[in-house]
Image (cartoon, rainbow, N blue to C red):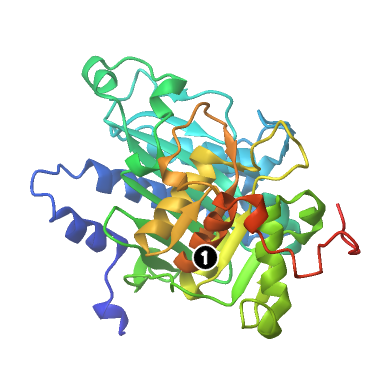
Amino acid sequence: MPLCQRWTLTRYLIEQRRRFPGAGGDLNALLLDVSLACKAIARIVSFGELGEPLGALPAAETRCNVHGEMQKPLDLLSNEIFIRMSEWNGHLAGLASEEMDAPRQIPAAHQRGKYLLVFDPLDGSSNIDVDVSVGSIFSILRAPDDVVASGRDVIEADFLQPGAAQVAAGYAIYGPSTMIVLSVGNGVAGFTLNPNLGEFMLTHAEIRVPDDTHEFAINASNSRFWEPPVKRYVDECLAGRSGPRGKDFNTRWIASLVAEAHRILMRGGVFMYPRDHKDAAMPGRLRLLYEANPIGFLMEQAGGRASTGRQPVLGVKPTALHQRIGLIFGSKNEVDRIERYHHEPASARDDRVPLFAARSLFRD
């Protein structure tokens, strides 16, 4: 499509708002501020080891976050960019980030609004050293009525809303091109950053995830910790055309959630980071609010599915700001199958495929 015929992100949001004649445009303005933050982070990431723009904002020293993970200066810088680009606009009641222990209050100097912004400012930052695509993930929720009415400070409980309550969600991917993939509750669309114009242009309208696939992604190094339903599913896929599935599957593993989600939205597939037995006290690896819910929202809006393995992820009521969870998402029929395996009694499970059987090289 010629450049002059493509919609900008701004026009797309305006057209979406027409569905709600009473809407005041606050959500659009907030999403455009988020897109501006993503533009700034994309520019910084593109410099790689050159690191020239790192002086644009003060980067704190490397330290551990609430998850016990080392925060790189770029994680902290990206977090600061998200805050600075969004807290001033009068549309937010508060923010929460993977990189912050507690919710951030809107400064007294700024007006407070009716939305909550939840984000992972730089997902997969450990991949930057090897030039693998990374990204930012964001989710927008409505603030509770009493927060809006009273203007009080937000607390953790205000953010503990199920994924189905999200007003909008999306991610930016910083790869060969920079894209924002977004849903405002009416399907999923993708926008590519035109570096000449500095604008996100609509390049992928009405993204749909195919119902069926022949591609799956899982970290096989954790196979000895997988639960039986996951082992069964992977065994059947690896058995290929001669196995119970009757077709060959390809495997993929990028170790970047944004990149994995983007591949599946573009061409289908299923991604699995399931609950396992590696740490019995941990119900999963991915963060429910910052990762699982926004990615799950996009998948469901695109006709795919997102599940914990046992239930739809968007139906899970969060119990903590930094709660972790198992996550399986992608092509609907594959996620349905995996969920069904989790609900079948152990006696019904098929252990005929030998790769992970008791005499296997990968035995538990």
* Residue under numbered circle 1: 262
Left or right placement of residue 68 versus residue 10 in this view: right
The image quadrant that residue 347 belongs to is: bottom right
Rendered view: 244 above or below 91: below
Does dot 1 land on a helix, a strand or a loop?
helix
Percent position of residue 230, x then y: 67, 57
Q: Residue at x 40, y 37 (%)?
A: 162
Q: Residue furthest front?
A: 347
- The quadrant of the rendering that contains the N terminus is bottom left
Question: Relative to 318, is 221 above or below?
Answer: below
Amino acid type for the residue under numbered disc 1: His
Using the rendered image of the protein, determine whether residue 81 is visible from the camera's viewpoint.
no
Direction from residue 290 to residue 68 in the image, left or right: right
Front residue of 100/281: it is 281
Choose between 160 and 233: the one closer to the eye: 233
Q: Nearer the viewer, residue 331 or 86?
A: 331
Q: Residue 16, percent across and down?
A: 20, 58
